[in-house]
Image (cartoon, rainbow, N blue to C red):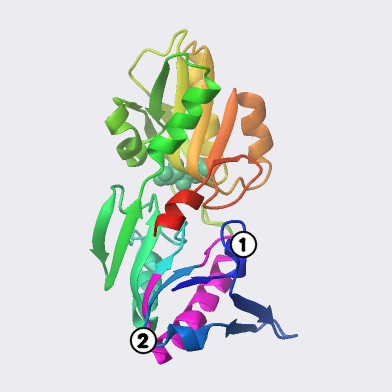
């Protein structure tokens, strides 16, 4: 049995209604709940944008399914809070663990997601109390880059060590990224201090591949490094594209092509997860 949230309507016909009361509280209606009784259910629901709201919506849907004794696998293409799986400062919260445990307690038996930031490899792994299946889109993204380079050879580059797993199978190279410390302020963000690499890029076509483009700072710095090193053309790609602020415009003007998947739909979503979702 397949259940689909309205935020997955680009891939499947929704059969869950999500509305809001005048004060902003969410209201959920799982239209086919009677058909879910005691069944295996695959629930498709995006958790970005509006990550906090969509997590609550998911917990409500899971509650209805728990009461119907359904065995639920959740497909959430991007897992929010995946960047905070560790505690660095006293009093900080490992929010990735909290989210995953909440999903488990609400009745999610397995979470299927794409290029989960803290897993950094494909396969099924327990995390906290939750079983997570992580699927990588690296091959699809690199296939798209090759098509853009029109058959010319490309060097594959990860902009930091965390993204090296995405390029390893293609003999890719990895840059080193050093961030500054957190600054006081409303937005928790560590600016990039420097990026370095020790390989030759002169006259080469380069594809920089990361798991996500958020503020775009990582990609912007990586493109600048490659261009400064004499690269011929530089493409940049990621599984998840948030493109905060004006980063998409900046990346378009700096690079020879920017694209992502539709785990988070965007104007440059060139790799679709639709076929993979249909197989789940
Ligand atoms: C970091 O470890 C991630 O893999 C990305 O490189 C990072 O989150 C991208 O963020 P931004 O676009 O803000 O540099």
- Quickly name the residue at label 1: 9
In the rendered view of the protein, which quadrant contains the C terminus?
Answer: bottom left
- Looking at the image, which residue is at 36% across and 88% down? 69
Can residue 68 be found in the magenta stretch? yes
Picture coordinates of residue 214, whole percent (x, y): 54, 47
Whether tag 2 and tag 1 are in contact, CB under 8 A, the answer is no
Q: How many marks?
A: 2
Q: Is residue 4 left or right of residue 84?
A: right
- Of residues 72 and 58, the one drawn nearer to the viewer in this rendering: 72
- Which comes before the other along the chain, label 2 or label 1? 1
Residue ranking furthest to the top:
203
Q: From this viewpoint, is residue 64 visible?
A: yes
Crowdedness near tag 1: few (<14), some (14–19) or many (≥20) residues, C-alpha within 10 Å: few
The spot of residue 131 in percent (x, y) is: 28, 67
x and y, in percent, of residue 54 in the image: 55, 71
Which structural element holds mark 1? Answer: loop
User: Does any portion of residue 178 appear in the rendered image?
Assistant: no
Label 2 within 8 A of ligand 1 by Cβ = no
* 37 or 269: nearer the viewer: 37
Give above or below for 68 relative to 78.
below
Q: On the rendered image, what quadrant is the N terminus found in?
A: bottom left
Residue under pointer 2? 38
Q: Which residues are magenta?
A: 45-73
Q: Quadrant of residue 42?
A: bottom left
Q: Residue at x 55, y 61 (%)?
A: 48
67 or 227: nearer the eye? Answer: 67
In the displayed structure, 47 sits above or below 141; it is below
The Cα atoms of the two marked residues, 2 and 1, are separated by 25 Å
């Amino acid at each position: 049995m397949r259940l689909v949230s309205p935020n997955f309507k680009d891939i499947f016909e929704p059969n869950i209604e999500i509305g809001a009361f005048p004060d902003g509280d969410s209201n959920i209606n799982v239209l086919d709940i009677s058909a879910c009784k005691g069944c295996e259910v695959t629930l498709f629901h995006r958790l970005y944008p509006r990550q906090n709201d969509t997590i609550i919506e998911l917990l409500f849907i899971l509650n209805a399914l728990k009461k119907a004794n359904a065995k639920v696998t959740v497909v959430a293409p991007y897992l929010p809070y995946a960047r905070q799986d560790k505690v660095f400062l006293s009093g900080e919260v490992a929010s990735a663990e909290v989210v995953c445990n909440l999903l488990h307690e609400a009745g999610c038996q397995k979470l299927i997601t794409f290029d989960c930031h803290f897993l950094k490899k494909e396969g099924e792994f327990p995390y906290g109390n939750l079983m997570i299946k992580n699927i990588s889109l690296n091959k699809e993204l690199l296939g798209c880059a090759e098509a853009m380079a029109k058959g010319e050879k490309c060097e594959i580059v990860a902009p930091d060590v965390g993204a090296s797993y995405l390029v390893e199978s293609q003999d890719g190279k990895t840059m080193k990224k050093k961030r500054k410390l957190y600054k006081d302020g409303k937005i928790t963000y560590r600016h990039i201090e420097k990026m370095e690499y020790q390989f030759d890029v002169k006259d080469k076509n380069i594809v920089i591949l990361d798991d996500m483009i958020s503020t775009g700072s990582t990609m912007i710095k990586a493109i600048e490094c490659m261009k400064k090193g004499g690269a011929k053309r530089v493409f940049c790609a990621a599984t998840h594209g948030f493109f905060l602020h004006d980063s998409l415009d900046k990346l378009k003007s700096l690079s020879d092509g920017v694209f992502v998947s539709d785990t988070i739909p965007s104007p440059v979503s060139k790799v679709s997860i639709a076929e993979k979702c249909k197989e789940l």
